[in-house]
Image (cartoon, rainbow, N blue to C red):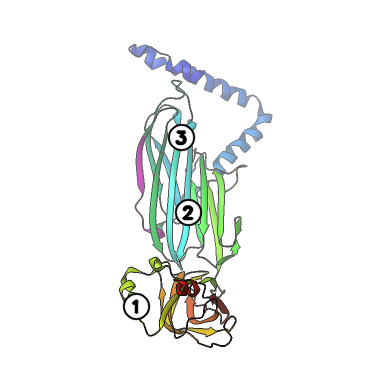
Amino acid sequence: DLTRLVANTDRHDEQALKDRKSPLASLGKKLVWKTLLKPWQWPKISRGFADLIQDGDIYIPYISPEIKPEANDFAFYEWNLGGGKSSRFLDKRLEISAREISPNHWKIRGNFFVEHLGQYDEPLAQDWKGLFELKFPAKFQQDDLRFPAKLAPGETWQEWFDFDYDGEISDLSVFNQRGQRLKIDLKVSLYGQQTFAEANFPHHENVGNVYEVLPKSPPQSGARREKMVWKAQADQISPFVTLHEWTDNREIIPEKFRGKWSDFFRNNSRKFNFAEIHFSEPVTLTAQTGVEITDKNFTNKEITDDPVLEEILLLDDRRTALLGFWQNQIQPKERFALKFRGILDDFGNEISLQKYTIIDKLSENSLEK
């Protein structure tokens, strides 16, 4: 009511403009006198001010110095350059995702979304005009982002950011400025096969996330900050094979090897075949990498012919390999054992010596043709 009373004035009358805020002065005097005359209310009022100071809504240097951004915070600021009182109608959400895409190599992505929830109601709710600012943790060495924006009631606005970071990360924190509310959605994804040894947030396997509104409720010290802290348990699990099939799908052969392998397929003295192998995680081939292919004599017991490996190709996803091998005799429906060695994951764990079976399901059809 007071806001509307102050706004409803003759804007071309100097005296009216000068006196338009006098009702506020009268109210202030009455509040002060009523407070002074009721000393039993003083402790309650004092506690209210103390909570506001402690939570940073009222900032006094050296009393609430901890209510400020730290070097490793994402820090959000809303600078309102006009727009009446529309700031309180803004629904602001900040989403940050930290994904470890290889050991100590991170993809940091985020989205900042704002919606003006108000209806046009001057002077209480009208167009919001101002600047949004996002500061990044110092270790990321990213320039601050500043977004001028104007939102009418009912409108939305959003902005994305995306960058890479090489280095260890063991915490993620967001600070929100005084007098503002901010919804945050923080996600952390450790590189595959790792787990959280310790974490102060909900998590499962190698993924954790936090949904929070800043400032937190009830008010508490540091209520304008959310901090995720964790320790990662390194991968200690050996990679293993998840798919092992004899195939004739030449489309999956990398382009640069197709000419070479086509010559193998045209060989008339012996038969060239290949198998598709999938691993449980990205792997690396080494100088010690080897594959043994053994005839299991399951279907054709009278024939023992161990195929000879020609080449193993690791595809770009590093989870798929093609095994090219030679056979002297065709054995339809025969089973062959595969045993791998010298194949490592990104934490140096070597594949186990477990044997896997591939079945020649294609030669019978080839003979019929």
- The residue at 40%/13% (across/down) is 9
Amino acid at the residue labelled 3: Glu
Secondary element type, mark 2 = strand
Question: Residue 6's spot in the image, x, y percent?
Answer: 45, 17
- The residue at 36%/36% (across/down) is 149
Sequence-wise first label, 2 or 3: 2
73 to 46, vertically: above or below: below
Q: Residues within 10 Å of mark 1 (few under 14, many from 20)?
A: few
Q: Residue furthest right?
A: 40
Looking at the image, can residue 68 be seen? no
Looking at the image, can residue 86 be seen? yes
- The residue at 44%/27% (across/down) is 153
The answer to if 146 sits in the magenta stretch is yes
- The mark found on residue 97 in the picture is 2
Q: Which quadrant holds residue 49?
A: top right
259 displayed left or right of 80: left
| Mark 2 or mark 1, whichever is nearer to me | 1
- Boundaries of the magenta span: 139-149
Amino acid at the residue labelled 2: Ser
Q: Which residue is mark 1?
A: 266
Secondary element type, mark 1 = loop
Amino acid at the residue labelled 1: Arg
Q: Which residue is mark 3?
A: 115
| Mark 1 or mark 3, whichever is nearer to me | 1
- The mark found on residue 323 in the picture is none
Quadrant occupied by the C terminus: bottom left
Q: Nearer the viewer, residue 272 or 95?
A: 272
